[in-house]
Amino acid sequence: MSISITTELLDGCVLALLSKEDYYGYTLTQRVQEFSPVSESTMYPVLRRLKKDNWLETYDEAYQGRNRRYYKITDTGLDRLIEIKSDWHEYKQTLDNVLGGEK
């Protein structure tokens, strides 16, 4: 797919994934890469920003002698996800009317 994903849509995708379950950073990146060609070097600043905005929080768990950082959506993040979904629905409907409309 060659259509770029906007920052808001990327935020929404990350928050949507985290609304279903907590993810370790690398696994979360892999899940996002299933639908968008985003690199790890792009994802970690996104995650830091989302944490700074209080839309997600982190916790560490031991794994094979090392700590893994997990990401978890907050209540504020769930509210933000609802806003993004609403914006997306309106935007998608507008584009569907323009791109999918008949002559």
Image (cartoon, helix red, strand yellow):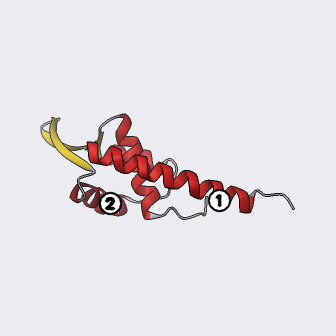
Disc 1 marks which amino acid? Thr
Q: Earlier in the sequence, mark 2 or mark 1?
A: 2
Please identify the quadrant where the N terminus is shown: bottom right
Say which mark, if any, is on residue 46.
2
Disc 2 marks which amino acid? Val
Identify the residue at horizontal 50%, vertical 55% (top origin).
87
Q: Nearer the viewer, residue 33 or 101?
A: 101
In this rendering, the answer to whether 5 lies above or below 28 is below
Q: Position of residue 4 (x, y in %)?
A: 54, 65
Separation of residues labelled 2 and 1 (CA atoms) = 27 Å
Q: Position of residue 90 (x, y in %)?
A: 57, 55
Q: Nearer the viewer, residue 39 or 13?
A: 13
Secondary element type, mark 1: helix
Residue 45 appears left or right of 8: left
Say which mark, if any, is on residue 94.
1
- Viewer-nearest of discs 2 and 1: 1
